[in-house]
Structure formats: C-alpha cells, structure tokens
Amino acid sequence: MRVFLAGATGVIGSPLVPQLLKAGHQVTAMTRSVLRAAQLEAVGADPVVCDVFEADGVLAAMRAAAPDAVVHQLTALPARLDWSDPSVFDANNRVRTEGTRILVDAAIVTGATRMVAQSIAFAYAPTGDRVKHEDAALFTDAPAPFGGAVAAVAELEQLVTGTAGIEGLVLRYGMLYGPGTYHDRRGSTAADVIAARVPLVDGATGMYSWLHVEDAASAAVAALEQGAPGIYNIVDDEPAPQPEWLPVFARALGADPPAPAETLPPPEDLVMALRGATNAKAKRELGWRPRHASWREGFAASLV
C-alpha cells in the first residue's frame, strides 16, 4: 500500500516509519526538517519537506505520492505542559483542526481512500463508568485549557470519520510513554518525578490508560490493513488511578517514592475525574494487541 505519513518524525511517527516499511508498505514521509528528511531517506522512506499549514504544498506532495492511505500523526505539543498557561494547547489544537482539514481535503483530491488519525483516549466526560468504550461522551465542557484540547480532538474525529469518500479510522491513544514522550527518562514529567515535584494524591479516583509508543505505532499499521471506519481506543490492558501507577513509575526511574499530597497538583480535575478506556474493540476489530500489556512491566522495560 502507498502510505502518506504526516508527522513522520514525531513521537509516534518515528517508530511507525520502520514498522510500515517492515509491513511492506511504500511510505512517503512528511517532515518540516531537511535534516530529518535525510534521516527518513536513510531508513527507506521517501521524504517530503512540507508544513501542514501550507495547503498548496501538502496537496502537491500528496499528488506526487498518489497514496492509497493517509496517516495523520502530527502534533505540536510543548516540551513541558504548563497547565496555568491558557494557550498551552493552542498550537496543537490548530494542528488537529486546520491541519486535519488540509490533510483530509488533499486526501480527497488525490484519491486516497483510507485515513488513520491520532486522537486521545483521556478526553471522556467524568460521569458514569470509570473505564469507557468508544461511544461514551467526551469532556467537551472541561475547564481551560483542557476544554479547548477536547474540542479540537472532537473536530478532528468528525473530519476524519464524517467526510464522504474516505474510510476514516481514529485512534484514541492512551497516555504515552517510551522514547520522546513526557514519561521518557529525559522527559519533563520524569524529571519532575525524580525531583519530587509530583506528589501522590492518596484516594485519587481518576483513571489513567497507558500506551507505549511502539504499541501506538503498531495500532496504526493494523488500522491501515483492517477494521471498519470509526473510533478505536488504543490503550493497554490495565487502567489505573494515580496512587497505583505513580509509585511504579518512580521506582522504574530510580526516584524516591512520591510523598502524599497536601494540595492537589495541576490539573486537579484530571487527577480526580479522568476516565480510563477499554481496548476491547481494537483487539476485536483491528486484531491489535499491545506488546506492553500493562504499564507495570512497560515502565520498567522502557526506562532501563
């Protein structure tokens, strides 16, 4: 299959390129960096240097690639999440709205028939069951800045799954860990845990669903090859609240056990209200299984 991959050098795109090539796909890999284009070419992809907001350039690149399918793994997240900054997600929200529209429009014009796009599995409304299926409502009235991020993923999902002529599959990824993520050993969250800046919120009920970046990539490969259009939770098998996973994460980092909190860390609403997700649909319809079935072994394996 001819695949046009937007976000080829990102956290998920980086492991996705070799997985796509290994699966026998022909990959046109979009990046904004000439240096990274050379790296993509070295591993066997056909690189194209382009910014997603340059609609004419994206269309020209996609025309030249003539893809059967488009994979959207673009993000624009900061190196550190500052929840006190109301604009912290603005750049990423633009990618998920304007950027997605440009990719969808180019896919339609160039004859691509399938699209796989990245979303998030931690945007469910904090009501009812603590572990959610894909048909559960999203947290569209979340306080800022998270509310804007949820609105942006809702728009992305509608664009991808609701555009005539495209078989759109949306992958709602869990909290990512592994190389390049906030939870990598060199990531900002890991640094905060090592510096004892992340307290344990005893009694917190918010549920976190985790996912290793290699498993995120393998789900995208699976979604290209099978599965009906629609939305899929891509998470590991064990949703858990912060008091369960945080000490395991700290131990894998070699950090001191986190101390109990006297006040809630930001974002307080997520620590208490977050919902987890079930991967049953992805297992059933995509034939996908996470290699790291639980963060319990995944943290240790990825933080050596």
Image: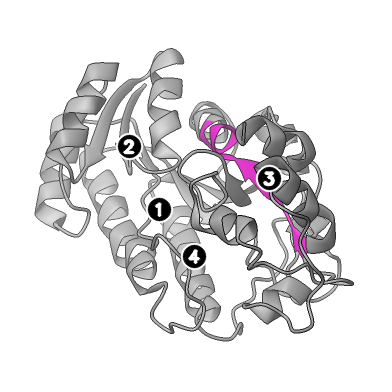
- Residue assigned mark 3: 235
Viewer-side label of 2, 1: 2
Q: Is residue 181 above or below residue 54?
A: above
- Residue assigned mark 4: 153
Q: Give yes or no for contact between labels 3 and 2 (Cβ–Cβ under 8 Å).
A: no
Q: Residue at x 23, y 18 (%)?
A: 42
Q: Give yes or no for contact between labels 4 and 2 (Cβ–Cβ under 8 Å).
A: no
Secondary structure of the residue carrying tag 3 is loop
Residue 209 painted magenta: yes
- Residue assigned mark 1: 164
- Residue assigned mark 2: 5
User: In 3D space, how far apart are the residues under numbered discs 2 and 1 (Cα atoms)?
Assistant: 21 Å
Circle 1: residue type:
Ala
Q: Considering only order in the chain, which callout, 1 or 2, is on the residue closer to the N terminus?
A: 2
Q: Considering only order in the chain, which callout, 1 or 3, is on the residue closer to the N terminus?
A: 1
Q: Give yes or no for contact between labels 3 and 1 (Cβ–Cβ under 8 Å).
A: no
Q: Residue at x 76, y 61 (%)?
A: 258
Secondary structure of the residue carrying tag 4 is helix
Q: Position of residue 119 (x, y in %)?
A: 52, 55
Q: Position of residue 16 (x, y in %)?
A: 44, 30
Q: Could you say which quadrant of the image residue 121 lies in? A: bottom right
Q: Is residue 236 above or below residue 136?
A: above
Q: Is residue 223 left or right of residue 80?
A: right
In this rendering, does residue 231 appear at all?
no
Secondary structure of the residue carrying tag 2 is strand
Circle 4: residue type:
Val
User: In 3D space, how far apart are the residues under numbered discs 3 and 4 (Cα atoms)?
Assistant: 17 Å
User: In 3D space, how far apart are the residues under numbered discs 4 and 2 (Cα atoms)?
Assistant: 19 Å
Q: Which residues are magenta?
A: 207-217
- In what quadrant of the picture does the N terminus appear? top left
